[in-house]
Amino acid sequence: MNSKEMLKRLQPLIALAAMVIALSVIPETHSTFLTFSNVRNILLQISVNLSLSIGMTLVILTGGIDLSVGAILAFGGAFAAGLFKNGLSLSLFGVQVQFTVLGAVIAGILAGATLGLHNGLVITRLRLPPFVATLAMLCIARCFAMLWTNGHPVSALGEHFDFMGAGSFIGIPMAVWISVALAILFQIFSKRTPLGRYIYAVGGSEKAAKFAGLNVNNIKLWVYTLAGALAGVAGLIQTARLDTAEPNAGLGYELDSIAAVVIGGTSLSGGRGSIFGTILGCLIIGVLNNGLVLLGVSPFWQLGIKGYVIIAAVAIDNLSSRKKE
Amino acid sequence: MKNYLTKLAFALATALMVFPAFTTRADDAPKTKVAVVISTLNNPWFVVLAETAKARAEELGYDATIFDSQNDTAKEAAHFENLIAGGYKAVLFNPTDANGSVANVLKAKAAGVPVFCIDREINATNAATSQMLSDSYSGCVALGQYFVKTVGTEGEYAELLGIVGDNNTWNRSKGFHSVVDRYPGLKMVAQQSADFDRAKGLEVFEAILQKNPNLKAVFCGNDAMAMGAYQALVAAGKDKQVKVFGFDGADDVVKLIAEGKIAATGMQFPKLMAQKAAEYADEYIKGKRDFQQKIPVKVDLVTPANVGKYGDFGKKQ
Amino acid sequence: MMRRAIPFIVLIGLAGGILWFFPLFSVVPLKRAQEEKAAATFNPQKFAETFWTDKLLPYLDKAVPAETLLPAIQHDPADAKKRFARSLGMSDSYTYFLSGTGRVIAVSDDEISLAITAGSTNAEVSLPMGMLFGNAIRDGTGLLDVNAYPNSQDFNNIANELNHLVETRVLPGLKERATVGATIHFAGCAEVDDESTDLKPLHVVPIQAEVK
């Protein structure tokens, strides 16, 4: 990698560093920003977005998009919580199936993966554009979440279930462990395994990938299924953290996820970017949100500032790549 | 090199964009900070609740900031974590979820920050310092009795529900039905959710009107939806045929009740609750510890007969 | 062929072993699960019935005598409110818990009107007939504390059930037996929302009403 590429990769890191330095120095936040509890809070608060954004990165790397991750998050969390708390009543056999935490977790992830697979099939077999297919799934998954919970949140799940979101291991919250572990795992996956490299290839040019003999459809199926599964994990983390699964959880989360991926340097046209960049993108959004709250900025202003940060991030990315060409 | 400069410029620009937002704040001696965490700012009733709480807290000498949870328990959790870390000394809290918000209040309690719930309850009596709750159920029982009196014991009516996942929606609906369901002649021909939203109330009710031309009345879970339903009736020319019942005590509905165009509403007292909560927080900070856990605030039935006493989200003084 | 199958068998065996110690789910007979669930939820009907027999009926002798209350209200309603009334939370409404003996002066479909003070021809107390709504019994005696119910829906359901008990245990047959001129001994609670209409007559929801 030459120095110009290195620089581009480090762009989000430098932006993050600048924000952290600014917040550590300004009098208003000087004593509250760099404390252990505040940093822990930031990492905790980005954990759900990070889990979602890993899958979103993979999807965007293939040149696609997934608008349904928020809704799948809601369904995955609600499905698991419902199975754990209420079990499954099979009146035909006269039994009630009580799920354990492990069973509910696996069920939640499988539910997310199934919905993700549905996305992939609609995109590859029915040839619908990803935007349309996942927009439809946004409604479908939300509908499933509402039907499963009858519109009411599922709460009071107990310590054992909540441990994966609210518990800690050597002082660091489980949610942070899980999301960071997944991020590292998938970073290695995307750069070092064949399937990971194929994902980049498909994003770079689908035609070239096909000529090279890659099964583009299968690769896309994998990517959307993984995105669904990771959305399921995000749903589990959120449900465990809040001790409640709400049918209207995750509203608008896909936008925060796309923002994190884009700010992290992944191109929306596919083929360029990394999960490492996405981690930085999540951190930037997390630090920004946290900083604005510590500064006491009105919630109305906060939305506007976030919008401009997204524009600035993508604009600078565009400018620097145009300069190269 | 040029890339480097562009990046630095960006980082600085970000920092600078934030400056205008905090230079408008007063720079005197640091006041104790009080947080107002509101479920949503998307509904004017909640805006009144939040701003009255903030204003009263500031009158009492505190620095008050409003946190908008956007109806999302996760955002609410993030707000609680941030405000505990940020040194806020009390929270005036409007929960998003009766069960889901309990964990957040317990976090604050563990950190020694008192939480005063306003308008909506949490299903726990050992978490918040005090809860000031609108007695929506009883308010709708009174509304239901008035409904039967004005609409009669026979006829078709429709119901517009609020957000399905919200406790208040069901409190109000159950209170209403506990009365009206005992009259077999009153038939509910449609029950749909319009999410407490005016525009959605209009759309949903238009469809209901189409299907049920002989409707005599509609009960709406809040005043925003009641306004939407009323506008649908005016557009269809049926505003004299169908009686509209709302709940909240919003200004525009109270005015229409005075004009005899809307039948009734339940006056919740957002300003009273918000002010009391701010005052309780003040008392707690000054050392008082014994507060009643649950304080139901009665909802008054507002009809054309007594509408003169009400206005501006409360009783006229 | 057996050679190729061995790794799979080992894998399935391992998976089975792991699932034995870390099960994904367990199966319970449906009836037992439903019974356990019902036992754990609050049953307002049972609660109201137990409360009625164990706590409410024995408490009736603590009610304010009507002969004391009515003149106090007549003389100074604000003072009477301070001395005898109970109010739930923040509200201008309040409830009285009273007992007394009255003479029936009118009977209609909606209510029985009683005069309490000797020689009076005005309705000073009225007993409602027909459907009962509201929180008079629940809040009037002060025996139930709103703080004891984390879910206010439970507290509301108690009011419903108490009203239902009055409708089924106290009111049936009362109207027929209450002829004009008869004497009724009653004990109950009266809600006052609007002082201009609810003080005279006091609308008393009866916990006990006997025609003498």
Image (tube, coloured by chain):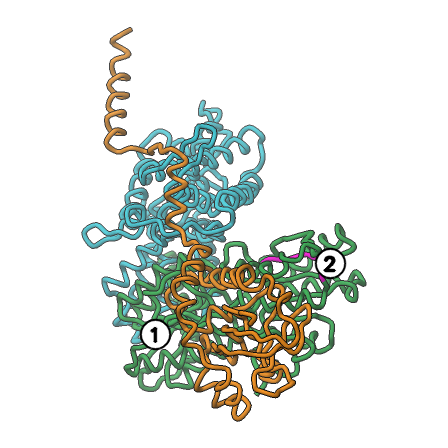
Chain colours: A cyan, B green, C orange
Q: Would you say the magenta stretch is mainly helix, strand or loop? A: strand
Residue at the image position 35 percent from the left and 68 percent from the top: B128
Q: Around disc 2, counting alpha carbons within 10 Å, would you say few (fewer than 14), some (14 to 19), or many (20 or more)?
A: few
Q: Around disc 1, counting alpha carbons within 10 Å, would you say few (fewer than 14), some (14 to 19), or many (20 or more)?
A: many
For marks 2 and 1, the one nearer the N-term is 1
Q: Nearer the viewer, residue C207 or B200?
A: C207
Q: In which quarter of the image is the N terminus of chain B?
A: bottom left
Q: Which quadrant holds residue C116?
A: bottom right
Please state if A196 lies on the left or on the right of C73 as rendered: left
The amino acid on which the numbered mark 1 sits, given as a three-letter code, is Ala
Q: Which chain carries label 2?
A: B
Q: In front of the other: label 2 or label 1?
A: 2
Q: Which of C203 and B99 is in front in this view?
A: C203
**Whole-percent x, y for residue C148 in the image:** 37, 65
SS state under label 1: strand
Q: Which of B155 and B59 is in front in this view?
A: B155
**Whole-percent x, y for residue C66 in the image:** 50, 82
**Whole-percent x, y for residue B44 in the image:** 56, 70
Give, as a single range, the part of the protein colored magenta: B153-161
Mark number displayed over residue A313: none
Residue behind mark 2: B154
Question: Per the image, is C31 magenta?
Answer: no
The amino acid on which the numbered mark 2 sits, given as a three-letter code, is Glu
SS state under label 2: loop
**Residue B286 higher or lower than C158, as above or below:** below
**Whole-percent x, y for residue C164 in the image:** 53, 60
Question: Per the image, is B155 magenta?
Answer: yes
Residue behind mark 1: B90
Residue at the image position 79 percent from the left and 60 percent from the top: B236
Which residue lies most toward the front here? Answer: C212
Q: Which quadrant holds residue C36?
A: top left
